[in-house]
Image (cartoon, grey):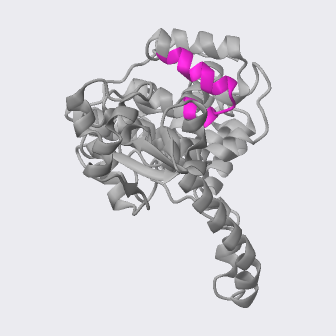
């Protein structure tokens, strides 16, 4: 719900002065909101304009759309005296309707989850032979971007290869994957959890088995022989890609799995979520070293981290690293803050659109030796 509200607030801020984006969202999603008529708005004009933070000029007031909702749905605004209440109805301007919509979304989501929980067991039992296994594994299914819908460069080829991964790690990977990549470049190896988290991410982003093996072999063999690598690590990479064992197609980790997974051991392991598993001092130093946004932007990220809103912190990182991404054609922001692969895909699309092919497999300038800062 917090991520939904965060996106709604961003939509409201990024819209023009008349909140056209927010209006379109409300219209497309059939939110049951009662608009205030022009006559009623004129009758209450003196009282509506006295609400703190409301329209500051007659012209702005005329252009502001108001909605009438039961005051119990606007308790957050009532407590801050940010709406006018009369006869049990709260009069809310469009710019402040976000809290009302978020509350409605929360109620609808709770009802839907309760309904799904009530029928899940029965459906899974009745359809055990047909869709039972699918239902039982639904919580672990990955529906975001990834192979076979791999991230593509402007030349139509897979953007992520052993030759381009270093440059793309710096340009387009979320912080969790940047740290895994830099840990691999620094130590020339990854522990088991790190290999799983990073390897499945690379697979989901479209890196082929051959490129995946080539990339890991290139790093691991800096501290071991090719025979040792093939004996100890090649099998697990092939297993990840469904070529060994039960030949299952394993899916990349989403943010919740990473956040609630086993925390990394400091200085030894590099997996996990930096916003969850790094302490405040190390995370703040890392954000500063990477020059992520302004001081104010980093303060917002740290505030989300301290409040336990790790996914919002990650979404804010994307926002400040990709200015005006919401207005760039071809950039799908669905899943940013929910899945590392969605973050990566949106970033590559953004740079493709901005730079005329920043993620093309043929024109990425390799940045050998240029890494991303580490902190644990």
> Between 366 and 291, which is closer to the camera in this rendering?
291
Residue at image location 60% in from the left, 47% down from the top: 254
Is residue 274 something that shows in the picture? no
Residue at image location 45% in from the left, 41% down from the top: 7
Q: Position of residue 244 (x, y in %)?
A: 65, 61
In the image: residue 348, left or right of residue 258: left
Residue at image location 69% in from the left, 16% down from the top: 280
In the image: residue 99, left or right of residue 148: right
Query: Which quadrant would residue 48 be assigned to in this image?
Result: top left
> Between 199 and 238, which is closer to the camera in this rendering?
199
Note whether 92 is above or below 364 in the view shown: below
> Between 299 and 261, which is closer to the camera in this rendering?
299
Q: Position of residue 211 (x, y in %)?
A: 47, 44
> Between 373 and 369, which is closer to the camera in this rendering?
373
Number of numbered labels in the structure image: 0
Is residue 290 something that shows in the picture? yes
Q: Which residues are magenta?
A: 297-313
């Amino acid at each position: 719900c917090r991520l939904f509200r965060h996106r709604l607030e961003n939509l409201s801020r990024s819209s023009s002065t008349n909140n056209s984006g927010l209006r379109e969202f409300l219209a497309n999603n059939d939110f049951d909101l009662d608009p205030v008529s022009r006559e009623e708005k004129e009758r209450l004009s003196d009282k509506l304009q006295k609400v703190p933070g409301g329209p500051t000029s007659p012209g702005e007031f005329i252009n502001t759309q108001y909605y009438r909702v039961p005051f119990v749905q606007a308790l957050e605004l009532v407590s801050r005296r940010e709406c006018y209440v009369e006869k049990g109805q709260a009069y809310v301007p469009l710019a402040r309707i976000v809290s009302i919509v978020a509350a409605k979304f929360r109620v609808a989501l709770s009802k839907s989850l309760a309904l799904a929980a009530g029928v899940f067991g029965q459906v899974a039992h009745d359809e055990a032979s047909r869709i039972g296994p699918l239902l039982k594994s639904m919580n672990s299914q990955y529906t975001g971007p990834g192979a076979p819908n791999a991230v593509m460069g402007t030349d139509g080829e897979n953007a992520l290869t052993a030759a381009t991964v270093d440059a793309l790690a710096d340009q387009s990977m979320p912080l969790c994957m940047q740290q895994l990549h830099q840990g691999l470049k620094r130590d020339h190896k990854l522990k088991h959890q790190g290999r799983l988290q990073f390897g499945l991410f690379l697979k989901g982003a479209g890196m082929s088995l051959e490129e995946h093996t080539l990339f890991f072999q290139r790093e691991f063999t800096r501290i071991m022989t090719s025979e040792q690598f093939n004996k100890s690590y090649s099998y697990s990479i092939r297993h990840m890609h469904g070529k060994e064992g039960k030949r299952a197609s394993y899916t990349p980790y989403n943010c919740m799995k990473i956040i609630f997974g086993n925390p990394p051991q400091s200085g030894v392991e590099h997996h996990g979520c930096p916003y969850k598993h790094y302490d405040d001092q190390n995370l703040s130093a890392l954000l500063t070293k990477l020059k992520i946004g302004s001081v104010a932007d980093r303060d917002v990220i740290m505030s989300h981290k301290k409040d336990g809103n790790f996914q919002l912190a990650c979404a804010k990182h994307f926002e400040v690293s990709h200015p005006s991404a919401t207005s760039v054609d071809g950039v799908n922001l669905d899943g940013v803050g929910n899945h590392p692969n969605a973050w990566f895909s949106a970033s590559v699309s953004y740079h493709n659109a901005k730079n005329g092919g920043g993620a093309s497999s043929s024109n990425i300038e390799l940045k050998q030796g240029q890494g991303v800062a580490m902190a644990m």
